[in-house]
Amino acid sequence: MTEERTILVTGATDGVGRRVVERLAAPGVHLLVHGRSTDRGKAVTGHVERAGGSATFLKADFDSLAEVRALAERVRAEHPHLDVLVCNAGISEPDGPRKVTKDGHERHLGINYLAHFLLTHLLLPRLGARRPSRVVNVVSAAQDALDFDDLMLEHGYNGYRAYGRSKVAQAMLTLDLAEEYAGAGITAHCLHPGTHLDTTMVRRAGISPAGSADSGAEAVVALTTPDDTTGGYFNVRRPSRAHPQVYDREARRTLRTVSLHLAGLDHSA
């Protein structure tokens, strides 16, 4: 008997994340549905169950690293193996003033990147535990180089730049994972799922959607089957190149060191 696949999707109660879950819903698949709204979470898990799969809703606000830790602890306690981790949750606040998370980090970097950095590292013992696993980071073609002298954009804040930096950081995490765990049963890819897709985040930003959330979800789902490929950046479904800084090993090393400290992982397991 084939063992049930377990897949965690963050930001899974709306937009691309919800469409990803709906496409993955099937017998033999257990979906861990992350979100902030219990009502929306119940709606998504209900859809999964009607499609013959099973699902668990995991409530957590990525504005708080404590809540990320609690989510990871629950997953580790309840699931001995994780087949796929899709890091999709994120924000885009291009026109507003600079804001910080509950931990004091610039919100784009904190939610889009640092929360997923922490979650991924806490779940590493469950990835590749029994069979090959895959990490998929949903990034963006809107990318901006990180400035390690002002990582939190305390000077000259710009929402578009903050968003772009958070996505470069996610892509850098992807390459780090691909290199560190090559041959160890964990592969990682990242992708730009499409430009200005029809999601709540895009509409709230006052942007007219140019593509469907469904098309973005299809591109994500295409990467969720673990295979021998790793470390790729895809523009929708086409292999492409991310920002040049992503391929700078020294920059990635610096980001990793800073991130371990910010996430409280530099002196903990």
Image (spheres, rainbow, N blue to C red):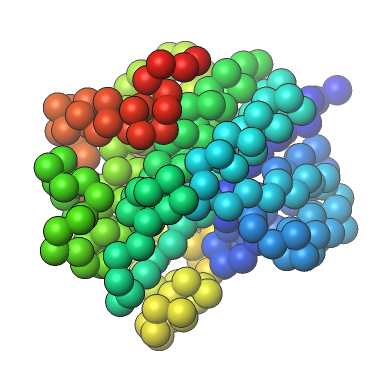
- The one nearer the camera, 185 or 36, is 36
Residue drawn at (80%, 60%), measured in percent from left and top? 42
Horizontally, residue 77 falls left or right of residue 268, namely: right
Residue drawn at (61%, 65%), measured in percent from left and top? 14
Residue drawn at (69%, 62%), measured in percent from left and top? 37
Asked whether residue 163 is in view, the answer is yes
Horizontally, residue 86 falls left or right of residue 237, namely: right
- The one nearer the camera, 212 or 165, is 165
Residue 208's quadrant in the figure? Answer: bottom left
Asked whether residue 234 is in view, the answer is no
Q: Number of numbered discs present?
A: 0
Residue 254's quadrant in the figure? Answer: top left
Q: Is residue 105 above or below residue 4?
A: below
- The one nearer the camera, 141 or 78, is 78
Locate residue 185, reporting x and y percent.
51, 18
Locate residue 148, reporting x and y percent.
15, 40
Locate residue 91, reporting x and y percent.
44, 62
Locate residue 264, reporting x and y percent.
42, 28
Q: Is residue 108 above or below residue 4?
A: below
Q: Is residue 234 above or below residue 256?
A: below
Horizontally, residue 218 falls left or right of residue 241, namely: right
Quarter that holds the N terminus: top right
Residue drawn at (53%, 69%), measured in percent from left and top? 213
- The one nearer the camera, 107 or 183, is 107
